[in-house]
Image (cartoon, rainbow, N blue to C red):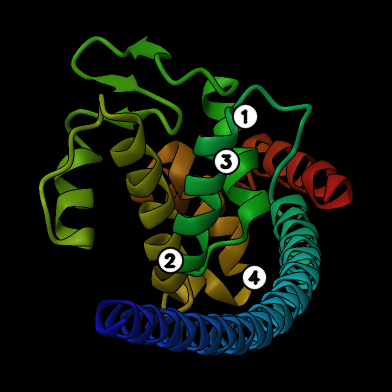
Amino acid sequence: MQTLTTSIKKVKILLLTIFILLICVILLSFYTYNTINKYKSQVSQQNSTITSQIQTINKYKSLYWEQTLIYQSDVIEVGNRISKLSEMVYNTYYMEDIKLSDELQQYTHKMSDKYNVEYSKALAVMKLESRFDKDAYNDNGSSNDYGLFQLNNIYRVSWVNQIIGRTINRYNVYDNIEGGIAILSKLESHYNEYPYSQSNPVKMAIMEYNRGINGANNYYRKYRGYHIYVDLIENYKKEFDKAK
């Protein structure tokens, strides 16, 4: 009888233990469920925040690209305006009909500004002297002329060196251009102070470019006028002035 009672007690204890364990499992399951739901809620909130941030980022990206397109459009417009202005400047000196490259025309224009000589006059002298042939050569026997401005190896080059303050190479087309324009400038200032300048110093300067100082002065004394070379230069100059 005692053994049975002991066995029953053991069974009761076992059942109680099982019940307690079951309660613990239920409580643990409930806690775990709540914890998981809590984390799910937090994750959901974080996802919502991330989604909102992504939307904000996309919004700013869209604004950035829109602004970039606006800036690009502005840059293109400014570029077009600069191009038009450049074309306007370009058209003030470039003449399509003459046999002289754009680069050399630009340089001639630059030197004309530097030495205060009319661009159309520089072109007129070039046309009459060499027909815009940068390799034009004329043998005078004791001397020779070369290039666009037909610089003489004896009577011109040394003088040009003094005017511009350096030694030029008349076979270099840029030196030839600068040398010719520098001479025109020097002659004009020379005849502004010369006795015969009362007639027309500009015409005297042009005639001297062709005949030399003594030759021009002697011609004017003898004929009280100007050589046909002057008329040709002035006519060419008028043509170039109209072509601008």
In whole angstroms, how far apart are the C-alphas of marks 2 and 3?
A: 15 Å
Kindly indicate the quadrant of the structure image that contains residue 59: bottom right
Q: What element does badge 3 sit on?
A: helix
Q: Circle 2 sits on which residue?
A: 115
Q: Amino acid at mark 3?
A: Gln
Callout 3 touching callout 1 (CB < 8 Å): no
Quarter occupied by residue 24: bottom left
Q: Which mark is residue 199?
A: 4
State which mark lies toward you, 2 or 3.
3
Horizontal relation, residue 16 to residue 126: left or right: left
Circle nearer the viewer, 4 or 3: 3
User: Nearer the viewer's eye, disc 4 or disc 2?
Assistant: 2
Q: How busy is the neighbourhood of tag 2: few (under 14 within 10 Å), some, or many (20 plus)?
A: some
Ranked by sequence position, the earlier of labels 4 and 1 is: 1
Along the polypeptide, which appears first: circle 3 or circle 1?
A: 3
- Which residue occupies 63% across, 80% down? 40
- Dot 2 falls on a residue whose secondary structure is helix
**Given the current orientation, which residue lies at the most extreme right position?**
242
Instruction: Specify the label residue 127 is tagged with.
Output: 1
39 shown above or below 159: below
The answer for how far apart the CA atoms under marks 2 and 1 are is: 19 Å
Q: Which residue is mark 3?
A: 105
Of pointers 2 and 3, the one earlier in the residue sequence: 3
